[in-house]
Amino acid sequence: MHTGQHYDYRMSGIFFAGLDLPQPEVNLEVGSGTHGAQTGAMLKGIEQVLVSERPDFVLIYGDTNSTLAGALAASKLSIPIAHVEAGLRSFKRSMPEEINRVVADHLSDLLLCPSEVSVQNLAAEGINRNVHQIGDVMLDVLNWARQRLMSQPSQILESLGVKQGRYLLTTVHRSENTDDTSKLKQIIHAFNAVAEPVIFPVHPRSRKVIGEVRCEIASHVHMIDPVGYVDMVALAGNARMILTDSGGLQKEAYWLGVPCVTLREETEWLETVEEGWNTLTGYDFVRITAAVQSFKPAGMRRSLYGDGFAASKCVELLSERAGLVTVAACSQGKA
């Protein structure tokens, strides 16, 4: 089931194609809107499908409005919920994603955690039953993309005119950065101030805000449309450094051995910071530019977030709970 939370081809269809995913059997086509309106429309649509299909489990992923709506719809129909990426916490309740993940975890019957820290977070909230540390399915997908690149090399660097290790890759899409124009302007100002090419695949919402506030963009900052997942892995793996407010890209930077500057004051992926490969700067111009110039990873990279076989562990645990299960996956178009 695709809720249509990301309805733009650049943020949805491109990933179905790039990840060899089959088209969803149901697309609610909810589209954009306020959090309440969007979540309410999803809740209504998901409930109708669940009443019709009566699945053994509803599988939800991450911390989006789709995740919250899927959890609420299933719980009200007494259908068991399995939450992939359970237990993450930023401890910042002003983040919509934090509310989504907390509610989803407390409604879930099977909690599939990426790390020991996420297991501990759940325990601190009194959630101890049916909690399993299985690793991160994003590592499974990253390994698949690496294999694909070995047999079908990407031409994305050549098409953008950049060379391995001689550019920065950035993404900015979190509402805490895009909804506050003073923060967004400092971030863009920092990109303008660095002395090397910056490749900036721009989320449609971010592009709209940048246009509205009329941020001046330096010539070395290349604002491009979002790219497919395999091309994004090629860009990330060959960058000198990654600057992002994305949780997923923080992990991918770590797995790929690329230093990461996180444009937030906190992260759910604390282990990447503790291992010395990720540093938090927030939106501050001085901190961002200083990190670009001086941040260097400390030490070796220990294995984090599983062994690349999280998906099969999810399937095994679902099978143990429900036999041969029929799963309704409520997603926003992410693998």
Image (cartoon, rainbow, N blue to C red):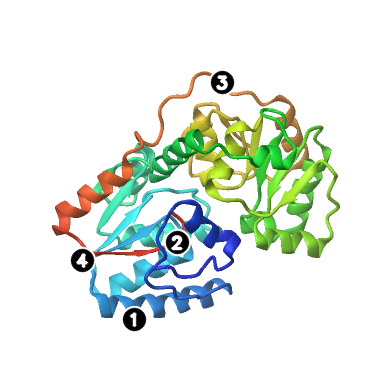
Q: Of discs 3 and 1, which sits in the foreground?
A: 1
Disc 3/disc 4 C-alpha distance (Å): 46 Å
Classify mark 4: residues with Cα within 10 Å, few (<14), some (14-19) or many (20+): some
Q: Residue 39 placed where, x, y %?
A: 47, 73
* Residue at x 39% of width, y 36% of height: 305
Disc number at residue 298? 3
The residue drawn where x is 48% and y is 40% is: 269
- Residue 178 falls in which quadrant of the image? bottom right
Q: CA distance from mark 2 to mark 1?
A: 21 Å
SS for dot 3:
loop
- Looking at the image, residue 222 sits to the left or right of residue 323; the answer is right
Question: Element under label 4?
Answer: loop
- Residue 313: x percent and y percent? 26, 44
Q: Quadrant of residue 101?
A: bottom left
**Could you say which is closer to the camera, residue 217 or residue 232?**
232
Mark drawn on residue 300: none
What residue does disc 1 label? 48
* Up-down relation of residue 45 to residue 62 (above or below): below
In which quarter of the view is residue 32 placed? Answer: bottom right
> Which disc number belongs to residue 100?
2
Circle 4 sits on which residue?
56
Q: Earlier in the sequence, mark 3 or mark 1?
A: 1
Q: For the residues carrying marks 4 and 2, which lies nearer the camera in this image?
A: 4
Type of residue at label 2?
Asn
Residue 28: image x %, image y %?
45, 75
Residue at far front of view:
151
